[in-house]
Image (cartoon, helix red, strand yellow):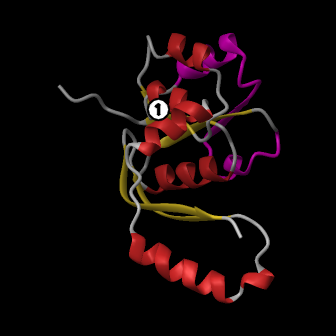
């Protein structure tokens, strides 16, 4: 049996939360926003907004009781709190993804599994930089990422990273 979702809880009321609430509104879903600030952009499209600390376990637990599905718009949410809440409601993206995004070492290790170098792109960049060497006195990071996000997964389609110091 498929569960019905009519109310989406969004932890974070910033710009991404606003876009998510707007998208939910367009398909007839009710949105409840949990924000730590009263000037949250997401309140423009939210059906209900609750204010509190992102580390307030008790308040976040009360928030989850009024939604069918829970998500978050940024990575600075207390994992310990979400793990407790996750026992009563599904949270997307999964908490395992949040744990990776909160730890830069884990994040680098995770993404290093998907990084590859494509020399033709880097060679073109290096030749351009070397022609203008006198103007470029700082390190460079080349990054081109095309990411598909869905409610429950992150799929990397294309990623190129390289560095150069002049």
Viewed as shown, does residue 82 lie left or right of 117?
right
Q: Residue at x 82, y 46 (%)?
A: 39
Q: Position of residue 7 (x, y in %)?
A: 47, 34
Towards the viewer: 116 or 14 = 116
Single out the residue that lies furthest toward the left. Answer: 1
Q: State the residue in front, 25 or 140.
A: 140
Quadrant for residue 13, please give it: top right
What is the x, y in percent for residue 6? 41, 36
Residue 120 visible at all: yes
Q: Residue at x 72, y 16 (%)?
A: 56
Q: Is disc 1 surrounded by few (<14), some (14 to 19) or many (20+) residues within 10 Å?
A: some
Residue span colored magenta: 38-66
**Could you say whether the residue bearing mark 1 is in a helix, strand or loop?**
helix
Q: How many discs mark residues in the rendered view?
A: 1
Q: Is residue 43 magenta?
A: yes
Q: In this figure, which residue is indicated by the disc labeled 1?
A: 97
Q: Is residue 14 above or below residue 159?
A: above
Q: Is residue 58 left or right of residue 67?
A: right
In the drawing, does residue 51 fall left or right of residue 98?
right
Q: Is residue 9 visible?
A: no
- The residue drawn where x is 37% and y is 38% is 152
- Work out which residue is located at the far right of the displayed protein and give it: 38
Left or right: 79, with 151 as reference point? right
Q: Quadrant of the C terminus?
A: bottom right
126 over 29 or under it: above or below: below
Tell me the quarter of the image containing the N terminus: top left
In this rendering, the answer to whether 114 lies above or below 152 is below
Observer-nearest residue: 160 or 132? 132
The residue drawn where x is 58% and y is 32% is 105
The image position of residue 76, as x and y in percent, is 67, 32
């Amino acid at each position: 049996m498929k569960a019905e979702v009519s109310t989406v809880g969004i932890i974070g009321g910033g710009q991404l939360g606003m876009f998510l609430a707007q998208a939910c509104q367009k398909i007839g879903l009710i949105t409840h926003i949990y924000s730590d600030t009263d000037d949250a952009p997401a309140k423009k499209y939210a059906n209900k907004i609750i204010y509190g600390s992102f580390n307030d376990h008790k308040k976040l637990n009360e928030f989850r009781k009024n939604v069918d599905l829970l998500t978050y718009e940024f990575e600075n949410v207390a994992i310990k709190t979400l793990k407790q809440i996750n026992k009563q409601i599904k949270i997307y993206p999964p908490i395992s993804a949040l744990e990776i995004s909160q730890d830069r070492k884990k994040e680098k290790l995770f993404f290093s599994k998907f990084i590859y170098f494509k020399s033709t792109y880097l060679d073109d960049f290096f030749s351009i930089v070397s022609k203008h060497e006198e103007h470029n006195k700082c390190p460079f990071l080349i990054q081109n990422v095309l990411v598909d996000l869905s409610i429950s997964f992150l799929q990397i389609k294309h990623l190129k990273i390289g560095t150069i110091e002049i």
